[in-house]
Amino acid sequence: MSNTISIEEFNTLQEKLQNTISQTFDYKKQIERLTKELEKEKEVKLKDKASAGINSFLNTLKKGNLAEENEKLKAEIELLNDFKVQNEALKNHIHSLTNKYDQEMSILKSELENYKLNQQQEQSDVLLMVPETNIEKNNIKQKIKNKKEI
């Protein structure tokens, strides 16, 4: 199984993480509010079964829900960190491929320039040879004419 995900999935996970974090803060605010209410009740010395029930509820809420949320958040953070590492590796691979491509392009451009220069040099050499060949042909023709005349 691959840990690679699309940007859309990554963004969705990130949004879920933000929502979970927001909910966790809301839970904390609720716990703080309920704790303050409980402290007020303690100050008034209302120690009855209802107060014990609230204490039990708060302890369960504090320990249970927050522990579960923390575990979920830790797992999501670990997953996001894995994706981040993979994205960095992919980014580095893309950069290396781009650099390799740029180097190959530069080599090919250089080879093309050398090829063009060699072609131009060969054409120029051929053009220089042509007049000599014509002169030689004319000289040979002249010699042949001269021999025929004799």
Image (cartoon, rainbow, N blue to C red):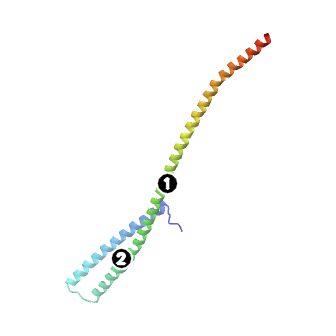
Q: Is the residue 14 above or below the residue 109 in the image?
A: below
Q: Specify the quadrant that holds the C terminus.
A: top right
Q: Is the residue 1 above or below the residue 105 in the image?
A: below
**In the rendering, at what x and y percent does residue 69 appear?**
39, 74
Name which of mark 1 and mark 2 comes first in the sequence. 2
Residue under the image location 69 percent in, 20 percent down: 136
**In the rendering, at what x and y percent does residue 88 appear?**
45, 59
Asked where in the image residue 13 lies, by quadrant, the reply is bottom left
Q: Which residue bears the numbered disc 2?
A: 66
Q: Are marks 1 and 2 in contact (CB under 8 Å)?
A: no
Q: Specify the quadrant that holds the N terminus.
A: bottom right
Q: Is the residue 27 above or below the residue 55 in the image?
A: above
Secondary element at image label 1: helix
Q: Is the residue 142 above or below the residue 122 in the image?
A: above
Name which residue type carries label 2.
Answer: Leu
Left or right: 39 in relation to 111: left
Residue under the image location 20 percent in, 86 percent down: 45
Question: Count of labels shown?
Answer: 2
Name which residue type carries label 1.
Answer: Ile
Q: Which residue bears the numbered disc 1?
A: 94
Residue 65, label in figure: none
Instruction: Characterize the local packing of mark 1: few (<14), some (14-19) or many (20 or more) Cα atoms within 10 angstroms.
Output: few
Left or right: 44 in relation to 10: left
Q: Residue furthest top?
A: 150
- Which mark is nearer the camera, 1 or 2? 1
Asked where in the image residue 133 lies, by quadrant, the reply is top right
**In the rendering, at what x and y percent does residue 64 appear?**
37, 80
Front position in the image: 4 or 85: 85
Front position in the image: 67 or 59: 67
Secondary element at image label 2: helix
Report, in whole angstroms, how far the alpha carbon at label 1 lies from the one at label 2: 41 Å
Residue under the image location 76 percent in, 15 percent down: 144
